[in-house]
Image (spheres, rainbow, N blue to C red):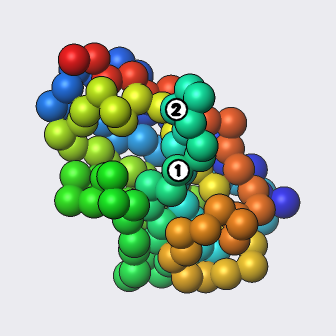
Amino acid sequence: QVQLVESGGGLVQAGGSLKLACAASGRTFSGNAMGWFRQAPGKEREFVASISWSGTSSIYGNSVKGRSTISRDNATNTVYLQMNSLKPDDTAVYYCATSTTTRWARELSTYYDVWGQGTQVTVSS
């Protein structure tokens, strides 16, 4: 079983940047698709980004497209989410997730079967 631990969240001013990290431990990581999702208070969970097992393919949610970059380092079992030009609407708990059933970047949360505990991102105006 893979375990995921997110880090890098915090408080940042609008227009600033943050880089989230998700460290995986346990069984297979390098063969799995990885994703980032977020959930703001009172809102549904939202897709942020996903990356394929090799790191050569990635997709983004419309709300972060052009402002965020997902990457992974299979040597260290870590996936990253670089977020720039942050807005107050980006405030949410950000979750890392992995799929043990697909190698390819996916948007739907139903593809992901292991989730981290989340890291809080707060963007002040």
Q: Secondary structure at mark 2?
A: loop
Instruction: Tell me if 60 is positioned left or right of 46 in this view.
Output: left
Residue drawn at the location 39% of the way across and 71% of the way down: 59
Q: Which residue is mark 1?
A: 46
Q: In the rendered structure, are the residues bearing label 2 and label 1 in contact, judged by CB atoms less than 8 Å apart?
A: yes
Residue that appears at 28% across and 17% down: 124
> Seen in the image, is 20 located left or right of residue 39?
left
Above or below: residue 119 compared with residue 83: above
Please, what secondary structure does the residue beneath circle 1 have?
strand
- The answer to whether any part of residue 12 appears in the image is yes
What is the quadrant of residue 44 in the picture? Answer: top right
**Residue 29 visible in the snapshot:** no
How far, Cα to Cα, is label 2 from label 1? 9 Å
Q: Amino acid at mark 2?
A: Ala
Q: Give the total of numbered labels.
A: 2
Query: Which quadrant of the figure contains the N terminus?
Result: bottom right
- Label 2 neighbourhood size at 10 Å, few (<14), some (14-19), many (20+)? some
The quadrant where residue 70 appears? bottom left
User: What crowding class fits label 1: few (fewer than 14 Cα within 10 Å), some (14-19), or many (20 or more)?
Assistant: some
Query: Where is residue 111 shown, x and y percent of the image?
Result: 69, 71
50 sits to left or right of 69: right
Q: Residue furthest front?
A: 42
| Picture coordinates of residue 75, whole percent (x, y) | 51, 66
**Mark 2 — residue?**
40
Position of 26 relative to 29 (above/below)? above
Residue at the spot 38% in from the left edge and 65% down from the top edge: 60
- Please, which residue is most extreme toward the right here? 1
In the rendered image, the quadrant that contains the C terminus is top left
Counting from the top left corner in percent of width and height, residue 12 is at 28, 21
| Mark 2 / mark 1, whichever is N-terminal | 2
Q: Amino acid at mark 1?
A: Glu
